[in-house]
Image: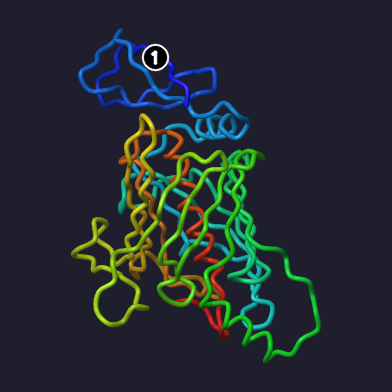
Amino acid sequence: MQAFELVVPNGAVAGQTIQAVTPNGPVQVAVPAGLAAGDRFQVQLPPSDEAAKAAASALSQLGNLGRSVTFGLSSSSISGADGLIDQSVAGEMPVTSGEPGVAAGPDVMKLRFQSSKRGRHLHAELVTPDGTRIAVLDMGEVPKSTPGALFGSAIGGYSTAFQPPPPVQLSVLGQAYGTYTCTSLMNCGVQAGARWQRRDGTGGAMIAEPERVGCCTTAPQSISRKKSALGKKEVPFTATFDAEKGHPAETTMVHAVTDSSAGKVPQFIATNVRQVVVELDKITDPHKKLDCILIGATLAALNVTTGIPSSGGGG
């Protein structure tokens, strides 16, 4: 990491997020407590490789987002799907930004997704309204077409639904950026834990569900509307970033909303997750904010392309 000195601009106050131009590209930082306009302070810049530059450019193109981003699985438009034999699905969902749990604002991105073998293959893209591909997510390989019986296809889809999917490789603006590895499942197709790691070895994070209680270890650890910070039935995940030199560990919340008030899951989609809401305001490092968006995109893409062991859609 590289230290870089910044000056608090006129009109900025402690705690306010400002954007600055650095040798490694634009960055967004919060003004430290106790500082005023004209004061100097140092920030740690991300590594100056192509991936880091791509990340800085992506942050600049996304602009000022709200306190959270929401991936609207229940608002997905499905352009093609097959449930039992090919286990294929394709479509896109809106990505909005605003206050956590509040009605969605305007779209800030689209998450386009396509899977030719649900649970084992995925290709997804985060696209801005002007058509810029901010990020690409790839998992597994497109399966080859081979003659097979309906029974064999159905059994294969059922068995893989209980196995963690392969690692998801993510690129940002064409540069290899990070890997999302699902480590365990809490029930059919829904992750219980995952590991996020940037390609350069920095910015690692653990994504975990609440601790399980009781004898049923495969039950989703959902919480009620009354206990939810969003006021919706959900499975809350914590995303905890590793402590690094000059950067303490930071934690934020990723909410997998299952509440029926968040909309009906489209036909041919197996998940009960209606929305994935990622809180951004608890993270101060701008590159980790991008990581949080990518973590949310991956969780949303994995859920919307979850394999289904029998014909039919979500609830």
Between residue 314 and residue 286, name the one nearer to us: 286
Image point (58%, 70%), residue name = 119
Colour scheme = rainbow
Give the residue furthest to the top.
38
171 lies above or below 268: above
The C terminus - image quarter? bottom left
Image point (73%, 70%), residue name = 143
User: For residue 232, what is the image quadrant?
Assistant: bottom left
Between residue 255 and residue 112, name the one nearer to us: 255
Disc 1 crowd rating (10 Å Cα; few below 14, some 14-19, many 20+) is some
Q: Left or right: where does residue 34 sit relative to residue 312?
A: left
Image point (36%, 29%), residue name = 246
Secondary element type, mark 1: strand
Residue 164, x across and y down, in percent:
52, 69
Image point (46%, 35%), residue name = 287
Give the residue furthest to the front.
245
Q: Left or right: where does residue 285 sit relative to residue 149?
A: left
Residue 149, x across and y down, in percent:
74, 90
Q: Count all numbered tags in the image, as a single digit.
A: 1
Q: Mark 1 points at which residue?
A: 6
Between residue 128 and residue 310, name the one nearer to us: 310
Say which amino acid is labelled 1: Leu
Residue 48, x across and y down, in percent:
57, 26
233 lies above or below 276: below
Between residue 151 and residue 244, name the one nearer to us: 244
Residue 137, x across and y down, in percent:
60, 52
